[in-house]
Image (tube, rainbow, N blue to C red):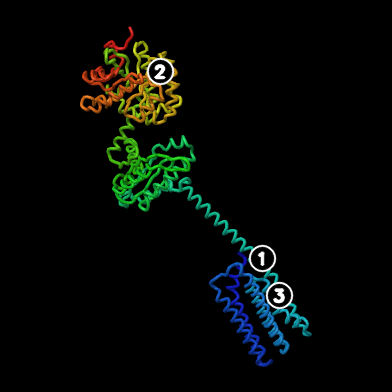
Amino acid sequence: MILVEQFRALRRQVPLMYLMMFADSAFLAFTAYDTVSPWWSLGMPALLAMLSAVRAAFWLKRRGDVPRPELIPNYLRGTILVAATLSFAFGGWGLLLYAEGDLMRRACIALYIFIGAISCCYCLQSVPRAGQAVLLCGAAPVTVCLILSPDWSLRGLGFNILVAGFVAVRMMRTSHAGFVEMLASRSHMAAEQARAQGAEQRAHQLAYHDPLTGLPNRRALAEALERRMAPDGSGASLGLLIIDLDRFKSINDVHGHPAGDQLLRDVAARVSAVVGEEGISYRLGGDEFAVILDGDGEGARRIAHAIVNAVMKPFTGSELVHHIGASVGISLYPQDALDLDTLMRKADIALYKAKHSGRNQHCAFEPMLDAEIRRRAEIEREMREAMKTDAFVPYYQAIVCLKSHEVVGYELLARWRRGEGEEIGPEQFIPIAEECGLIDTLMLRLLRRACRETRDWQVPISINVSPTQLKDPWFSQKLLGVLIRERFPARRLTVEITENALIVDAGSAQEAIASLRNQGIQLALDDFGTGYSSLQHLQMLPFDRLKIDRSFVAAMGRDPQAMRLVLAIVTLANTLELPVVAEGIENAATAEALARLGCAMGQGFHFGHPMPVEGIAAVGGGVAA
């Protein structure tokens, strides 16, 4: 750094030094013109002027570039050597002129020589040795002559020049030290500025980018949308895609966070590749991503479809292959919203619809979706209030032996007595209760009330369990706690579990089922035939009965294929010595056909609608004498 700055200073100042030397030589020649021969008064200054011009041209040629640092010492050594040589020639010539002059001319010649030497020193202050060489070779000889002169005025001038030269040398050293210190300070400041800029860039990177995937983050998304969305809708059309990964949590839980992190990086790369130059991808956090696209809704739907298909393909890791999916919600500016919050909310609404349409789907926002979300939010609010007032009541639907037509049990169903006597079925509020985390509280309250109402009945009752409840490691203890507190025999309770509930978290489901079975609770596999891996579930888990889904039963009278499927299920169950319950029996013909096929039990409107405990008591069903 110092060598480079020394070179730059010389490049600026040396041409001025040679100009000064040329002017000083001219004044010396003029002073001694008539006292020496023309060679010494004209030829010598001309030679010095030519040499000065050559060196000045050398430096002027390099005024626009800086050589490699390892070459600069050669330039500096050359400068010292040339300065010493020219100063010696200039001083020697001046000394010759001094010897031939009278008193006045000697004083003038000495002053010209010293002024020239001092001027050269200041031009060479970035290289102190060169300046010292100029004083030593140029000014020192004539100074010695002045001091040794018999004339006291010349002696005084000599001592004055000696003191001034000493001061000049000290000032040159001080100036060079300040020059070096200034360069060091500038270098330090440059390093600090570079560090500050680097820190600022890193802070900006952290503030606006996701450190895991490298994608811009939620803050960057918000600012990008705010820049592009005009409140009056005059901005260019754009589409916002919100992407949520399906089945990602199980990857994290089973294989650990490192595998999950790598999967997120792979998803980010795949989504960015699909989007390409048509938009920008963002990571919002967790397993949620976003994309801003230019253009209309058709392009947004096309990209959303491509993202869904891309994420569905297997992700191959170092040791594992992961299969996940993606749901995508789409909102458009300015069609759907004119501000950031509304656009984001409507994309989330569309995403919610996509996830509840079976996952691996994409959905564009529609006004009816907003109304649906508001309706669900209102139902959730009312549900929380209704739980405080016990507005949810248990209804009971009879399970009948198809041969004897006797009631052999009741299935517990939830009903919500809303305001003004309106009753709402479980198909409306159960999904909402599962989403907002109320299903556990709701089921346990209904079971507690049912245990009190049916404690003295001779027949058992059955209750459905949500897939989310089986994921709770304390579920079986909670259920058994209700039975113990209400003094209800565990053998008189049947828990109905769907096949889909077993797929959500097979490990937790098996633990919960084993715990319930050990306490004497009966288990039924509900909606048999509509889920996955049914035979595997029958082999792995100790079920006490099967329930045929109502969709097969309802189609028996018009679809021979449905009849054959029901026969196959009944035959399989009888082979495994498992009683079968058929759901959805609505007429006597269906009941008789099922009995002929070997089905043991059935339930449906043919045997009676679900009723509260008062209705059951009125017809005398299920109550012990």
Amino acid type at circle 3 is: Gly
Q: Nearer the viewer, residue 171 or 62?
A: 62
Q: How far apart are labels 1 and 2 at the CA level?
A: 94 Å
Q: How far apart are labels 2 and 3 at the CA level?
A: 112 Å
Give SS at disc 2: loop
State the residue position of label 2: 521
Spot the residue most to the top.
Answer: 625
Q: Residue at x 33, y 26 (%)?
A: 528
State the residue position of label 1: 177
Give SS at disc 3: helix
Give SS at disc 1: helix
- 1 and 3 marks in contact (CB < 8 Å): no
Q: Residue at x 35, y 52 (%)?
A: 278
Q: Which mark is residue 165?
A: 3
Image-quadrant location for residue 267: top left
Mark 1 or 3: the one toward you: 1
Q: Earlier in the sequence, mark 1 or mark 2?
A: 1
Image-quadrant location for residue 396: top left
Amino acid type at circle 2 is: Ile
In x, y percent, where is residue 346?
Answer: 33, 41
Amino acid type at circle 1 is: Ala
Q: Nearer the viewer, residue 293 or 258?
A: 258
Q: Residue at x 73, y 88 (%)?
A: 99
**Mark 3 burial class by Cα count in 10 Å: few <14, some 14-19, many 20+:** many
Q: Is residue 175 above or below residue 432?
A: below
